Amino acid sequence: MSVRIAVTVNSKSYHETVDDRYTLADFLRERLRLTGTHLGCEHGVCGACTVIVDGASVRSCLMLAAQADGASVETVESLAAGGDLNPVQRAFKENHALQCGFCTSGFLMSVTAALREGPVRSADEAREVLSGNICRCTGYRGMVQAVLDVSS
Ligand code: FES
Ligand code: FES
């Protein structure tokens, strides 16, 4: 069954007709061509597909596009302004917190959502912020330092 949705993505309004089984991740990637949101496991484990919906980090592989009707969605494409990396992205770069980068957009969105709730003051808190996302490359040390740097 098709449903009409009105959704704001990265401050732009969209009115679209979608299949009621279409995931938000597929909607963002295939319909809007916002391919910075990645798909790894597609069942809610890896966090690669993390976006921010109405202020909360969400795994977009587990949310239907139809459920985003009326919502405001932020993807990784919203972070850099005019091609300049934002502070979270810069901290990841400076701390070598990425290698292949497949997981990175999900981490950036999880960290962005967490930092809006307040600064991260310890390595343990940083690990907690990062704990919902999986990386196969980095060993996480750079990411922990990046989160601490951007919080300081
Ligand atoms: Fe969504 Fe892994 S692709 S959690
Ligand atoms: Fe390769 Fe995280 S940088 S999976």
Image: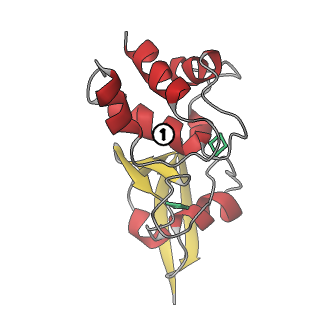
Q: Mark 1, residues whose alpha carbon is within 10 Å: few (<14), some, or many (≥20)?
A: many
Viewed as shown, does residue 64 lie left or right of 120?
A: right
Q: Quadrant of the C terminus?
A: top left
For image coordinates 60% across by 28% down, the residue present is 97
Residue 151, compared with residue 4, is above or below; it is: above
Task: Using the image as rendered, state which of residue 29 and residue 46 is in the foreground.
Answer: 46
Query: How far across and how far down the image is residue 42, in percent?
Result: 55, 68
In this figure, what is the number of numbered marks? Answer: 1
Residue 119, compared with residue 105, is above or below; it is: above
Question: Hey, which residue is sitting farthest bottom in the picture?
Answer: 1
Query: How far across and how far down the image is residue 24, in percent?
Result: 52, 64
Q: Image quadrant of residue 40? A: bottom right
Residue 20, compared with residue 44, is above or below; it is: below
The answer to whether residue 13 is visible is yes
Residue 30, compared with residue 102, is above or below; it is: below
Question: Residue tagged by mark 1?
Answer: 109
Viewed as shown, does residue 95 lie left or right of 35?
A: left
Question: Hey, which residue is sitting farthest top in the picture?
Answer: 152
Task: Using the image as rendered, state which of residue 132 and residue 69 is in the foreground.
Answer: 132
Circle 1: element type: helix
- Residue type indicated by callout 1: Met
For image coordinates 70% across by 64% down, the residue present is 30
The answer to whether residue 116 is visible is no
For image coordinates 71% across by 55% down, the residue present is 33
Query: How far across and how far down the image is residue 65, in percent?
Result: 49, 68
Query: How far across and how far down the image is residue 5, in percent?
Result: 47, 68
